[in-house]
Structures are given as structure tokens and as C-alpha cells.
Image: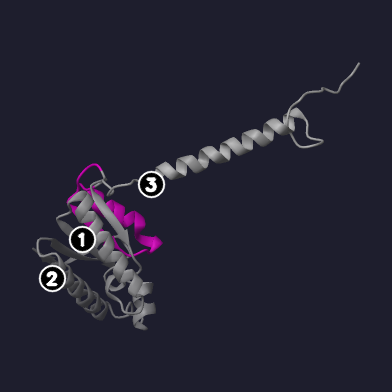
Amino acid sequence: MDTHHHCNCKHAPGENHSGARRNFLTRATLAAGVALLGTAAPSGPARAGGHTDILLLTCMDFRLMDSVEQYMAGRGLTHKYDHIVLAGASLGALTDKYPAWNRTFWDHLAVAIQLHDVKKVVVMDHRDCGAYNAILGEDLAPDPLREADVHRDHLDRLAAAIKDKHPGLQVETLLMALDGSVEALGNFA
């Protein structure tokens, strides 16, 4: 019995039908992927459905992510706010040490205003912040009163900058302790 199949198919020498089929399927899959990539990017301005009034800026500290979410949920804001995360929160948004972070904050704020019509920025710093230590070169945690004053200063500076660039926005500044408790430091209408 002849196990060789003879055909006029055009495939590489020594390649059988299953190899040719695999080769074709690979090429077809890649071509489809390239075609999808070409249609994935919107041609016009980005639009997002929905509306939220609040943009929240917090630090990246993993120790407090659950506490931040619980705090916002306690205010009835689950799934009702945009969230920006920068090391140091208010300090990260204003530091000269990492100017790209400044631009990131302001760009995100502009997009949140455009897409979701935010009316208020909530800035939440936290105690025992490693970014404050790294950027300012000082461990503030041993002196809680000084720590609160330094955070208040940076929070006030950011609130003033936000109000200067976007006078219609409200700004609320908060300081979270490692136990998840939150102290309101300012409310700028």
C-alpha cells in the first residue's frame, strides 16, 4: 500500500499536509491579530461611559490599599471614584525630584475631568510613608506631630495648586494612619 500522497499542493519540500496546514493557520492567526491591532485604537477622542464626582489620589503603599478601599466604601463611594496612585500622594504630585510624577498627576486629573466630569479631588496621604522618607530624606514617623505638620504642608500646597489650575474643583485632604483611621486635614471648596 502506498502511504505517500501525491498532489500539486504548494508547500515547502519535505513538508506534509499537516505541516502546511499548521503553517497556514499560524500565518492566518498572525494576520488576524495584526488586523485587530489596527482597529483597536480609537480614531477619535476617548470617551468613557458613566460619571463620577471624585478623583482620589493616594500613595502606592501596599499596606494601606485595603484600608483605602474600606474608607471609601464607608463613605458610600464603592465604584464611584477614579483613583490615581503615586508614591507619596501629595508629595509625589509636587516633588521636583520626580517631575514625571507631577505631569502624571495633572494629566490624569485632566482626563478625569474630561471623561467623568469630576468635581472634587480627595488627596489621602498616610503616616509612616516611605516616599516621604526617600524624597525628603527624613523619617517623620518618630514625631507624629511633626509628621502631621509636614503632610499638612504638602497637602495644602497641592490643594492650592489644584484650585489655581481648576478653580471649580473642590479639594479634600486626608491623612491615614497605619491602622486605617483617617484624619481630615482640610476641605477646600
Seen at 68% across and 33% down, the residue is 22
Q: Report the mark closest to the observer, 1 or 3.
A: 3
Q: Report the mark closest to the observer, 1 or 2.
A: 2
Q: Position of residue 172 (x, y in %)?
A: 16, 63
Please, what is the three-letter code of the amino acid marked with disc 3?
Ala
Disc with the residue nearer the chain's start (1 vs 3): 3
Viewer-closest of 181 and 187: 187
Identify the magenta region.
Answer: 49-77
The colour scheme applied to this rendered structure is one colour
Q: What is the crowding at mark 3: few (fewer than 14 residues within 10 Å), some, or many (at least 20)?
A: few
Most distant residue in the bottom direction: 137
Viewer-closest of 24 and 6: 6
Q: CA distance from mark 1 to mark 3?
A: 31 Å
Question: Residue 122's mark?
Answer: 1
Question: Residue 41's mark?
Answer: 3
Residue under pointer 2:
164
Can you say whether 56 is above or below 143 in the image?
above
Q: Position of residue 124 (x, y in %)?
A: 25, 64
Does residue 88 show up? no
Please, what is the three-letter code of the amino acid marked with disc 2?
Asp
